[in-house]
Image (tube, grey):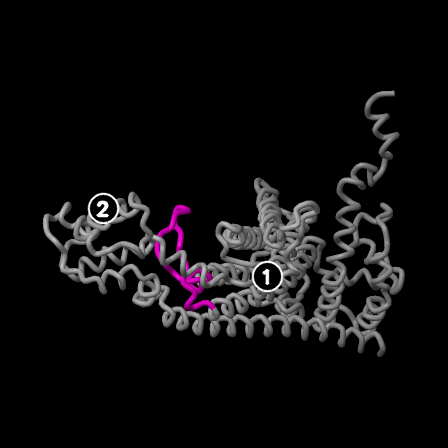
């Protein structure tokens, strides 16, 4: 027996081959019946309504097809297994329609193709999942703003290059996270708008000679615009790439914050205490209080970024033509990445909303830290009209000597500053003890940094108010989009129900 005969014997000599079923068709069917059946039926209803309105089918044909659409048992389809009798879910649904309505059901496929249908289905699924994820992102933003408001005066040390840099506040840090999240929300909204465009009417790739209305189907399915060029409608995949890119960046951004907070939970940092519902204990070490919620967020956000990256990698070098069959493989990775990001947004909101901050410990650490000495250098510029570079040299010498003597920053005396000034400029400074104490006070450091975006409590509260208003706008947009889609789907059900009962 030669190789070809042996393979045919194992796989079968007609479609579908056993391994092809296991590797491709069966997994695709499982995903399709779970995610694609509802939008597929919506497209059938919208296309039917348009065909009747354009008088491409008769009133009697429309009513018969409507009854057959209503007669399909969707739950039975969702419970079914792939048998190989039909190539995919589309042909199984079409077979049911023909069984219920006879040959007239074949007219439902007038002026359309699996190409434009497939991409439209994927866009409908993706927009729904985007709205779910956006809802959680906006809710997380609201929670972070509440947390920032609580900590507008919680002074802490800010870090650059993993080293103590300058005093700031917890609100200042969180507001940076909020603004990063806001940009992620903007990117996801932009991806939604690119996604929410209708390919229907493109048919295989050249539209149709029948006088259908692409615009009518677009409105019936709650799309904002058409993908105008029919070739682009079935060949372009960048709408999916834009979603993947937005999800990947959002996952990376949130993951960086999670990494910080996980480190802040250590006894050495002693910044955060995660609430009991989000920690686990050790099986052997009684003292352990493991912040596993942050640990899981860190790894799962990486998985979301990885799944999004898989989408982009699978798109690479795909010919610019019919993208539908390739999308069968790609789309589940996009869905999973959105689902995980949604879950992590929700979990992060819960953890942040219930965790405690060691305010006093952070303040004491800031008082003893040399992070305040930038303000001392600035003060010497003000009191003695030195250049900042000269002032920097003096303060640098002060810090080195203080560290050599084992002094904290708040233990530096005026005599040490004068000693450094004598060494650098050959004279004493006019700086007073009171000015020195104020310059080394982290609360004062924060309070006078009132420029736009600075950490002063007043500036933080101004930013928080603005970001809350911004969030209300996003929430209103989200609610309107959900309602538009809901009303459109309800209208499709209403019309086809009326026709089926006429």
Q: Is residue 155 magenta?
A: yes
Q: Which residues are magenta?
A: 151-174
* Between marks 1 and 2 in the image, the one whose residue lies nearer the viewer: 2
Q: Is residue 23 left or right of residue 361?
A: right
User: Taking the image as drawn, is residue 33 in sight?
Assistant: yes
Q: Is residue 160 left or right of residue 122?
A: left
Residue sitting at x 44%, y 70%: 464
Marks 1/2: CA–CA distance = 43 Å
Q: Position of residue 401 (x, y in %)?
A: 25, 45
Residue sitting at x 84%, y 58%: 77
Q: Is residue 115 magenta?
A: no
Question: Which structural element holds mark 1?
Answer: helix
User: Looking at the rendered structure, which numbered label has been put on residue 397?
Assistant: 2
Q: Is residue 502 left or right of residue 317?
A: right
Q: Position of residue 96 (x, y in %)?
A: 86, 59
Residue sitting at x 81%, y 70%: 66
Question: Which structural element holds mark 2?
Answer: helix
Q: In what quadrant of the picture does the N terminus appear?
A: top right
User: Looking at the rendered structure, which numbered label has been put on residue 351?
Assistant: 1
Q: Toward the viewer: 107 or 1?
A: 1
Q: Is residue 23 left or right of residue 134?
A: right
Q: Within the image, what quadrant is residue 202 found in? A: bottom right
Counting labels gives 2
Q: Which residue is the extreme one toward the top? A: 1
């Amino acid at each position: 027996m030669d190789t070809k005969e042996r393979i045919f014997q194992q796989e079968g000599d007609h479609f579908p081959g056993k391994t092809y079923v296991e590797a491709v068709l069966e997994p695709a069917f499982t995903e399709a019946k779970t995610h694609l059946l509802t939008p597929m039926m919506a497209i059938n209803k919208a296309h039917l309504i348009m065909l009747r309105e354009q008088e491409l089918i008769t009133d009697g044909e429309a009513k018969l097809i409507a009854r057959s659409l209503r007669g399909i048992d969707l739950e039975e389809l969702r419970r079914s297994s792939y048998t190989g009798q039909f190539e995919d879910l589309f042909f199984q649904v079409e077979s049911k329609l023909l069984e219920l309505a006879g040959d007239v059901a074949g007219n439902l496929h007038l002026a359309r193709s699996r190409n434009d249908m497939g991409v439209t289905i994927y866009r409908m699924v993706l927009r729904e999942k985007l709205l779910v994820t956006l809802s959680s992102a906006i809710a997380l933003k609201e929670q972070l703003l509440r947390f920032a408001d609580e900590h507008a005066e919680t002074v802490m040390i800010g870090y650059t290059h993993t080293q103590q840099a300058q005093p700031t506040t917890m609100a200042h840090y969180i507001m940076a996270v909020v603004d990063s999240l806001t940009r992620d929300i903007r990117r996801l909204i932009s991806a939604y708008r690119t996604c929410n465009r209708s390919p229907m009417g493109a048919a295989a790739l050249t539209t149709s000679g029948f006088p259908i209305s692409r615009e009518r189907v677009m409105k019936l399915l709650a799309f904002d615009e058409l993908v105008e060029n029919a070739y682009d409608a079935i060949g372009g995949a960048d709408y999916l790439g834009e979603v993947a890119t937005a999800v990947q960046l959002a996952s990376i951004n949130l993951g960086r914050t999670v990494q910080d907070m996980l480190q802040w939970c250590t006894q050495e940092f002693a910044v955060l205490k995660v609430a009991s519902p989000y920690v686990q204990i050790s099986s052997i070490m009684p003292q352990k209080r493991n912040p596993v919620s942050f640990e899981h967020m860190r790894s799962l956000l990486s998985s979301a970024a990885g799944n999004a990256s898989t989408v982009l990698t699978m798109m690479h070098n795909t010919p610019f033509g019919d993208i539908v069959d390739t999308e069968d493989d790609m789309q589940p990775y996009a869905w999973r990445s959105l689902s995980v990001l949604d879950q992590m947004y929700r979990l992060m909101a819960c953890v942040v909303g219930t965790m405690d901050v060691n305010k006093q410990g952070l303040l004491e650490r800031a008082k003893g830290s040399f992070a305040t000495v930038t303000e001392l250098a600035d003060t010497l510029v003000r009191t003695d009209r030195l250049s900042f570079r000269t002032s920097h040299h003096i303060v640098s010498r002060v810090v080195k000597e203080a560290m050599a003597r084992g002094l904290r920053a708040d233990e530096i005396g005026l005599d040490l500053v004068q000693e450094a000034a004598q060494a650098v400029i050959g004279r004493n400074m006019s700086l007073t003890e009171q000015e020195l104490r104020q310059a080394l006070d982290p609360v004062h450091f924060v309070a006078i940094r009132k420029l736009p975006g600075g950490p002063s409590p007043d500036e933080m509260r101004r930013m928080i108010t603005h970001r809350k208003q911004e969030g209300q706008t996003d929430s209103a947009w989200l609610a309107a989009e959900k309602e538009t889609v809901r009303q459109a789907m309800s209208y499709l059900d209403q019309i086809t129900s009326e026709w089926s009962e006429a």
